[in-house]
């Protein structure tokens, strides 16, 4: 696989065509008003192999907010800034059948780092003297992980969510009341929403996937960018919790550790092989991209990417 470039491109093009037959199913997220302004027809796929080869299709230069894909970054940073025990004293590791925005706690803490309550928790574990310093650290980290200097902050998306995010605000105050953190709840919420509002294109995100697929080592120099322990934890959590309440069925059908976001993106990581990023904004009831899920399923089969086979 990936040895014959022409053949790989043909397989991917064919998979895209098949997945786009579902392009009219599902709805674009509207609960963050700014997200309703996207073109539902937008589509991008970037696949980056551990050798650094890039396969790019559709609107791969288009920048969109990363939304819940930021939960992967927050977990990486929380693990970087604290011990593993310190992180998992504050957030669980179990999948949940409740929606990503659910307030329902498990043992007074979030079920896992990949639902909102979990990522608000990992955001509280990111170190820095103030909010700006913490957010600047997140941006610098993303630049390093994606090997790109073009990472932007989508102010309109941020403002739009800050004005409407009563649920996440409630979650932040709830977690604070349970002593999950003692920082100002508004500041923790702010960092979480800023992280969701980071703008990136699909190739930059596929690079982060490829880095994780490469065991956290830089694709060109092999220098360690993410520790092995963190890579193991992040991929295990992506496999078990990355697709919200559909995580089990997705793993069963697709067999690729993945993380989705309500902007319509899914990041998949195939250890030892590649990172894949699909963007298509129409979502199913769980908040996962309809075309994204279909495409990853087809690609898993056609490019032999299922981690269990
Ligand atoms: N910013 C979004 C929220 O908190 C992220 C959720 C998501 O992508 N699933 O609701």
Image (cartoon, rainbow, N blue to C red):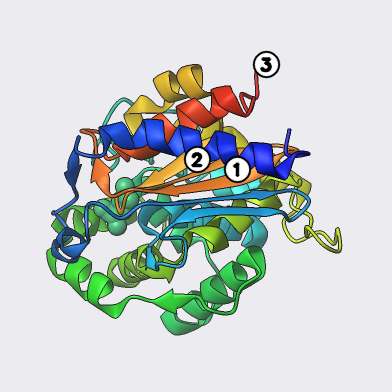
| Residue 65 place in picture, x, y as percent | 35, 64
Left or right of 290, for residue 250 = right
| Residue 13 place in picture, x, y as percent | 50, 40
Q: Quadrant of the C terminus?
A: top right
Q: Which residue is mark 2?
A: 13
Q: Tell me the element at label 1.
A: helix
Residue 242 shows in the view: no
Residue 137 shows in the view: yes
Q: Which residue is mark 3?
A: 309
Above or below, 182 relative to 49:
below
Are dots 2 and 3 in contact, CB under 8 Å? Answer: no
Q: Residues within 10 Å of mark 2 (few under 14, many from 20)?
A: few
Residue located 18% across and 52% down the image: 167
Are dots 1 and 2 in contact, CB under 8 Å? Answer: yes
Q: Which residue is mark 1?
A: 9
Q: Earlier in the sequence, mark 2 or mark 3?
A: 2
Does mark 2 have its CB less than 8 Å from ligand 1?
no
Q: CA distance from mark 3 to mark 1?
A: 22 Å
Residue located 27% across and 32% down the image: 22
| Residue 57 place in picture, x, y as percent | 49, 53
């Amino acid at each position: 696989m990936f040895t014959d470039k022409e053949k790989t491109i043909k397989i991917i093009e064919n998979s895209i065509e098949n997945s786009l037959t579902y392009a009219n199913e599902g709805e674009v997220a509207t609960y963050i008003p700014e997200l309703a302004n996207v073109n539902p027809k937008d589509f991008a796929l970037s696949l980056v192999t551990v050798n650094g080869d890039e396969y790019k299709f559709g609107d791969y230069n288009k920048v969109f907010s990363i939304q819940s894909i930021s939960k992967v970054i927050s977990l990486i940073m929380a693990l970087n800034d604290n011990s593993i025990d310190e992180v998992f004293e504050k957030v669980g590791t179990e999948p949940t059948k409740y929606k990503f925005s659910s307030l329902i706690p498990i043992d007074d803490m979030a079920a896992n780092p990949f639902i909102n309550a979990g990522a608000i928790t990992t955001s509280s574990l990111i170190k820095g003297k103030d909010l700006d310093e913490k957010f600047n650290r997140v941006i610098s980290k993303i630049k390093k992980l994606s090997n790109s200097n073009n990472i932007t902050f989508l102010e309109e998306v941020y403002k739009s969510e800050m004005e409407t995010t009563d649920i996440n605000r409630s979650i932040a105050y709830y977690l604070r009341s349970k002593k999950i953190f003692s920082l100002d709840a508004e500041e923790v919420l702010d960092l979480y929403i800023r992280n969701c509002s980071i703008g990136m294109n699909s190739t930059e995100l596929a690079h982060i996937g490829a880095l994780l697929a490469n065991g956290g080592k830089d694709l060109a120099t092999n220098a360690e960018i993410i520790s092995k322990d963190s890579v193991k934890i992040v991929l295990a959590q992506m496999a078990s919790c990355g697709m919200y309440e559909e995580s089990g069925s997705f793993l069963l059908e697709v067999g690729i550790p993945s993380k989705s976001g309500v902007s319509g993106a899914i990041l998949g990581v195939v250890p030892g092989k590649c990172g894949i990023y699909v963007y298509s904004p129409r979502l199913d009831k769980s908040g996962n991209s309809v075309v994204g899920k279909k495409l990853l399923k087809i690609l898993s089969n056609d490019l032999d990417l299922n981690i269990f086979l």
